[in-house]
Image (tube, rainbow, N blue to C red):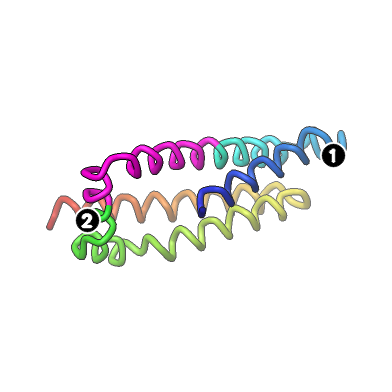
Amino acid sequence: MYAIIPILVAVGLSIYNVFFASERIKESFIFGFQFGAAISLGIISIAFLILYRRVLTDDKKLKLQYNKENDERLKTIRAKAGVPMVLITSIFMIIAGIIAGYFNLTIFITLVVAAVSQMLIAAVTKQIYLRKL
C-alpha cells in the first residue's frame, strides 16, 4: 500500500511536467532536477513493489524479511545512525529546495547539497556501526 503513494506522486508530477508546465518553467534548471527526481521516485517505488511481490510469494523469503525487519540489533543501529529522522528532514530539505529554487538558485543548491551530505553521513555512520558490532 505504501509503495503506491510514491508511484502516484511520481506519475502525477510527470503528467504535470509533460502537459501542464509552462515553457518558462521547463527551461529552468530546477525543472530538470524535479523531473529527474519524480522519475527516480517512480522507478525506485516500482522496484520495491517487485521485491515485495517476490517476497510475498515465497514463505522462506517472507520469514527472512520478517526477521530482518524486527531485528533488534538493526533497529538499534538505525536509531544510532539517526536514519528515520535524517531521511525525513532530508526529504523536506529537498522539497523546500525545489520550491525555493524557482526564486533563487543558490538556496536550491545549498539545500540539496546539505540534504545529500546529511544522508551520506547517516549512511556512513550506519555502515560503521554494522562493521563494529
Mark 2 Cα within 10 Å, few/some/many (few <14, many 20+)?
few
Choose top left, top right, bottom left or bottom right for residue 7: top right
Which residue bears the numbered disc 1?
A: 20
Choose top left, top right, bottom left or bottom right for residue 60: top left
x, y (%) of residue 96? 65, 58
The structure residue drawn at horizontal position 28% and vertical position 57%, both measured from the top left corner, is: 69
Q: Amino acid at mark 1?
A: Phe
Q: Viewed as shown, does residue 42 lie left or right of 121? A: right
User: Magenta part of the protein: which range?
Assistant: 43-65
Report helix, strand or loop for mark 2. Answer: helix
The structure residue drawn at horizontal position 43% and vertical position 42%, both measured from the top left corner, is: 48
Q: Viewed as shown, does residue 9 lie left or right of 125? A: right
x, y (%) of residue 98? 67, 50
Which residue bears the numbered disc 2?
A: 67
x, y (%) of residue 132? 13, 55
Above-or-below relation of 125 to 33:
below
Q: Amino acid at mark 2?
A: Asn
**In the rendered structure, does residue 59 fall within the stretch colored magenta?**
yes
Cα–Cα gap, marks 1 and 2:
45 Å
Above-or-below relation of 45 to 100:
above
**Labelled disc at residue 56:** none
